[in-house]
Image (cartoon, rainbow, N blue to C red):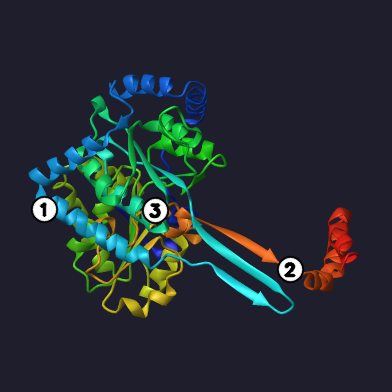
């Protein structure tokens, strides 16, 4: 049974508690990375044979990708149609994120500016097996394409050498350029350092298990990464006008991800709290993944009762959830009060799965409270910014003494001389 608290009775450590996936992967991952750096494709082929029982070529051919798309189109044309519509929604939303550079001209011949440029090559890690999500392919590929990334490379584990056709279909719809049959920490290492077959990328994005997350940590600095995502989480703020079966269903939509996921309800209604707790028990029995969802609800889930919806939002801001459902009749009245959340779902008709698959905003979101300082994956994640400055002789002469004063305050005489030596020639 899910735990129910009154706001004043729950201490801060319990309020902010997150369940982290246990991992002692550090040493194992460091050895894998070193092995891939030393032996390249040979190491990757050995790992594929050991973990995926695959001896197929590392790269998936264009013909294989096209065949997979045709297979899905033939067997499930509705799915292809839905994926293409979802891709259009994702593209439409993210197109609004694209930034332009700027240039400013100041008096005296000074020109300052900033260029926004795409990252040249990006690697997307896509989980395989039971966690094979074509939606993640779309959510990562499409912003990269909008940003202007020259080459998008996908790596994904392939049991028996077989990648689920729907993943390859999503790669085609999303605009990926190359796909490789490699998973785990070894795939991250290959993307970070390059091998004979897999090109070195400039940034690695995408979710993965504990070994993939650890590998991303270890290669950061060699390449950029998007984020280290923790277990999925949803927080629902709801008043007594909500149907408890709907609130429970929304909470379970996250709980079924894995046993470390977190589902929280914050409400100003004791009646709703009790009814949702009962509905969770009823609906858990209907789920194919009941064991996973039950572990999530019983170990990590909680219901918190507050005096007002404003109090509920204040608690939500402290928790800073990945997904925040605001289930009230006039949600825009409260939007300005929401400060910390990965993605906000407003009203009673915007359940979190709408964002996972279809609405358009990205579903790669900050977890574990990092929404206090981090943002959803966006076009910005696939760009870099470069500044530039230009001064005429006269403009430099006017400020050389000022810069020298600053430099000498910091004990950097060579900096000062770099300015003043030019002034002598003005």
The residue indicated by pointer 3 is: 144
Label 3 close to label 2 by CB (< 8 Å): no
Residue drawn where x is 28% and y is 21% of the image: 53
Q: Quadrant of residue 323 in the image?
A: bottom left
Of labels 3 and 2, the one closer to you: 2
| 124 relative to 401 in the view: left or right | left
Q: Is residue 175 above or below residue 387?
A: above
| x and y, in percent, of residue 138 in the image | 30, 51
Mark earlier in primary sequence (1, 2)? 1
Q: Is residue 286 visible?
A: yes
Q: Quadrant of residue 129 in the image?
A: top left
Gap between marks 3 and 1 measured at Cα:
26 Å
Mark earlier in primary sequence (3, 2)? 3
How would you rate the neighbour count of disc 1 (Cα within 10 Å): few for under 14, some for 14-19, many for 20 or more? Answer: few
The residue indicated by pointer 1 is: 78
Gap between marks 3 and 2 measured at Cα:
35 Å
Gap between marks 1 and 2 measured at Cα:
60 Å
Residue at disc 2, secondary structure? loop
Q: Is residue 286 above or below residue 265?
A: above
The residue indicated by pointer 2 is: 391
């Amino acid at each position: 049974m899910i735990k129910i608290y009154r706001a004043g009775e729950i201490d801060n450590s319990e309020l902010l508690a997150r369940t982290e996936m246990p991992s002692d992967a550090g040493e194992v991952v460091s050895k894998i990375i070193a092995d891939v750096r030393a032996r390249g494709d040979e190491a990757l082929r050995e790992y594929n044979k050991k973990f995926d029982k695959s001896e197929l070529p590392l790269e998936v051919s264009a013909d294989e990708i096209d065949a997979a798309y045709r297979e899905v189109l033939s067997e499930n044309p509705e799915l292809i149609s839905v994926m293409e519509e979802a891709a259009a929604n994702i593209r439409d939303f993210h197109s609004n994120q694209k930034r332009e550079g700027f240039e400013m001209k100041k008096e005296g011949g000074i020109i300052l500016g900033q260029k926004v440029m795409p990252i040249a090559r990006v690697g997307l890690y896509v989980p395989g097996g039971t966690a094979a999500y074509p939606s993640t392919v779309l959510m990562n590929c499409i912003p990269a394409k909008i940003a202007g990334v020259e080459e998008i490379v996908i790596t994904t584990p392939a049991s028996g050498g077989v990648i689920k056709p729907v993943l390859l279909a999503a790669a085609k719809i999303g605009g990926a350029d190359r796909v490789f049959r490699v998973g785990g920490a070894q795939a991250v290492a290959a993307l970070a350092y390059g091998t004979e077959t897999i090109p070195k990328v400039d940034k690695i994005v995408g979710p993965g298990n504990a070994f993939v997350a650890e590998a991303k940590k270890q290669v950061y600095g060699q390449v950029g990464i998007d984020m280290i995502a923790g277990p999925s989480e949803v927080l629902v703020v709801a008043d007594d006008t909500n149907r408890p079966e709907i609130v429970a269903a929304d909470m379970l939509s996250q709980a079924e991800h894995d046993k470390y996921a977190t589902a929280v309800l914050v409400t100003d209604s004791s009646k709703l709290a009790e009814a949702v707790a009962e509905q969770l028990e009823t609906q858990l029995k209907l789920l194919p993944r009941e064991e996973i969802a039950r572990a999530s609800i019983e170990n990590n889930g909680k219901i918190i009762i507050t005096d007002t919806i404003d109090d509920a939002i204040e608690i939500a801001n402290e928790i800073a959830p990945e997904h925040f459902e605001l289930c009230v009749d006039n949600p825009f009245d409260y939007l300005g009060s929401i400060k910390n959340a990965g993605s906000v779902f407003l009203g009673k008709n915007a359940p979190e799965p709408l964002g996972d698959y279809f609405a358009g905003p990205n579903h790669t979101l900050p977890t574990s409270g990092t929404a206090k300082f981090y943002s959803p994956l966006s076009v910005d994640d696939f760009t870099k910014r470069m500044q530039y400055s230009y001064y005429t002789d006269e403009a430099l002469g006017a400020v050389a003494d000022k810069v020298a004063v600053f430099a000498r305050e910091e004990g950097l005489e060579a900096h000062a001389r770099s300015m003043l030596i030019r002034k002598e020639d003005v």
